[in-house]
Image (cartoon, rainbow, N blue to C red):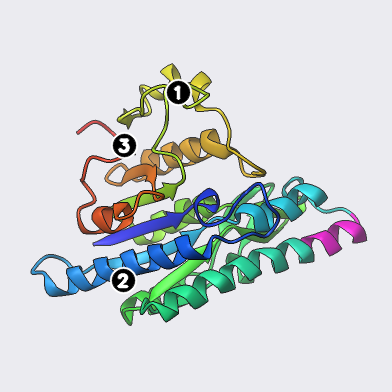
Amino acid sequence: MIIFLKLGGSLITDKTRVEHARRRVIRRLAREVAAARAAAAQSAGPDLQLVLGHGSGSFGHVAAKKYGTRSGVTDQSGWRGFAEVAASAARLNQIVTDVFVAEGVPVISLPPSASARCEDGELIYLDTFGLRAALDQGLVPLVQGDVAFDTVRGATIVSTEDVFVYLARELEPDQVLLAGEVAGVYDSADMTGRVIERLTPETVGQHIAALGGSHGTDVTGGMIGKVQQMLHLIRHQPNVTVRIFSGAKPGAVRTLLIDPLYPLGTVIGHDR
């Protein structure tokens, strides 16, 4: 079984404070992933192959907004900003890597910027040799929202969802789990309504007005961007199920890695 798990920037950082990582939360999540891997190893069920990703939160998003990197780079000031965004994203990635390794999860960081190629904001190439090799050796490849060179814009930003959509074509995961700070997709833009249990390509139009954005700075589209990306994924990979849920609740990540069908958050997928 292949599962993609994203730890959202809103979950592992305080998006209202510049470059503030929630280290206790990251450590708890690492322990939950370690526990799920151990449970899978001891069970008679399928092996768990995990691709881990994380958002940039108050690290890369803040710098990217300052320089407008997602829209493109046209001058030397923009290229210096490109480097600054890359360095900021890498700082958070190093924190996540260090914590997970310390908690017994053998992550290997594979930053998308090392090989990503975009065309007018769309990710069209990402080298997957290292990622496949890591999975074959029982490691946990770690990707992230990152900068990328772009044949039209000069440079841009790729979100973790962008990377997951690309990798889904290559690896055909069984599940994509997006762990954020909120309980799922709400039917009210101010998050006072109920959590929508299931979204499909046929029903999402009923909820577009309620999807809203995200708390803090987010240059990659907030909740509506996530939903649109995941709808794109399932249109091309109809056997994949996506779940958006809160990783702020202790035990939720562990539970869903062990039982991805556990009723939690919002499922995005075709009606079965």
Give the amino acid type for the residue marked by disc 2 in the picture.
Answer: Ala
Give the amino acid type for the residue marked by disc 1 in the picture.
Answer: Thr
Residue denoted by label 3: 269
Residue extending farthest to the left is 44
Label 1: which secondary element: loop
Predominant SS of the magenta segment? helix
Residue denoted by label 1: 192
Residue extending farthest to the right is 76
Give the amino acid type for the residue marked by disc 3 in the picture.
Answer: Gly
Tell me the magenta residue range: 75-82
Residue 81 rendering spot, x and y as whole percentages = 82, 60
Occupied quadrant, residue 196: top left
Mark-to-mark CA distance, 1 and 2 = 34 Å
Image check: 123 left or right of 181?
Answer: right
Mark-to-mark CA distance, 1 and 3 = 24 Å
Residue denoted by label 2: 34
Image check: 237 left or right of 13?
Answer: left
Residue 87 rendering spot, x and y as whole percentages = 71, 69
Label 2: which secondary element: helix
Mark-to-mark CA distance, 3 and 2 = 27 Å
Q: Nearer the viewer, mark 3 or mark 2?
A: 2
- Closer to the N terminus: mark 1 or mark 2? 2
Image check: 194 left or right of 146?
Answer: left
> Does the rendering let one see residue 26?
yes
Nearer-the-camera pick, 267 or 121: 267
